[in-house]
Amino acid sequence: MSKQQRWNELADVKDELASRDWFPGTSGNVSIKVSDSPLAFYVSASGKDKTKRTSEDFLLVDQYGKPIEETHLKASAETGIHCEVYRLTDAGCCLHVHTVDNNLISELYGDVGEITFQGQELIKAFGIWEEEGSITVPIVENYGDLSKLSEAVGAVIKPDTKAVLIRNHGITVWGRNAFEAKKHLEAFEFLFSYHIKLRTLNVLNKNQSFGGVINGTTTIS
Ligand SMILES: CSC[C@@H](O)[C@@H](O)C(=O)COP(=O)(O)O
Ligand SMILES: [Zn+2]
């Protein structure tokens, strides 16, 4: 696929996430791989309104997040996290959004350091088909030093990790291509929203048993 096709693919997925209001206050960043060896990927320019589609939305960077082509654009402040994802996984596209639900989950389970979902149909969106299958999302602290933050994200990525939550900040999620990255993001946001609502209902109905949370794992009963 040409660089232009990759650009268009990334612009399209960015538009779709924008239509869901997942880029509040210029937050969020997105990237798509253009070449494996040497690594090159388009990443969103820093500080832009990600709900707008312009010819200056992305720039091409190398494995260190440095621009490959002449540009006045500044790469996303969180490009280092995207570099870690491409270094450690088979990702072809990486998405980062701030939502109220992902922030709430990251705060509720930040001390545990992870959240695990089980017994939910949408786990199949991650290619997990076993009835008892589960998916775990690690949670890291929101270090102000962005190099330290990138390292912290890299440190919790295991072979089966599909996303990392940054505490009171947002989620970084990836897939082998833009379609899969968006599918994973939508599935996680569904699971987060479900979990928050279930917890709220549990608080409101303290004496009723219709599901619960054990050690950060959502259970259905
Ligand atoms: C404006 S709040 C969000 C930023 O601090 C950051 O977390 C973010 O997601 C966007 O940064 P950016 O440099 O535009 O990619
Ligand atoms: Zn962010």
Image (spheres, rainbow, N blue to C red):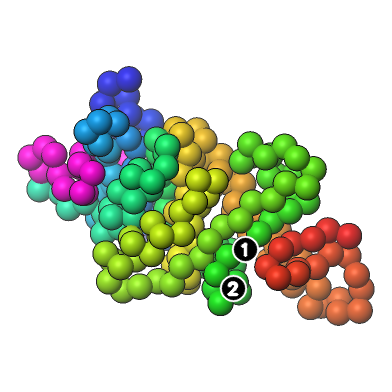
Q: Is residue 47 above or below residue 144?
A: above
Q: How many marks?
A: 2
Count neighbours of disc 2 (C-alpha within 10 A) and say few if under 14, some if 14 to 19, many if 20 or more: few
Q: Amino acid at mark 1?
A: Ile
Residue 186, position as x, y percentages in the image: 58, 46
CA distance separating discs 2 and 1: 8 Å
Q: Quadrant of residue 56?
A: top left
Q: Which residues are magenta?
A: 53-71
Task: Name the kind of residue labelled 2 in the image.
Answer: Val
Q: Position of residue 83 (x, y in %)?
A: 30, 48
Let me know if residue 159 appears in the view. Answer: yes
Residue 112 image label? 2
Q: What residue is disc 1 on?
A: 115
* Picture coordinates of residue 172, whole percent (x, y): 44, 54
Residues under numbered marks 2 and 1 in contact, where contact means CB atoms less than 8 Å apart: yes
Tell me if the residue at label 1 has its CB under 8 Å from ligand 2: no
Q: Please report the residue visible at 50 percent of the width from the left and 45 percent of the height from the top.
A: 159
- Relative horizontal placement of residue 64, taking residue 106 as reference (left or right): left
- Can residue 57 be found in the magenta stretch? yes
Answer with left or right where residue 188 lies relative to residue 56: right
What label does residue 142 carry, if any?
none
Q: Split into 4 quadrants, where in the image is the N terminus? A: top left
Q: Residue at the far right: name it.
A: 208
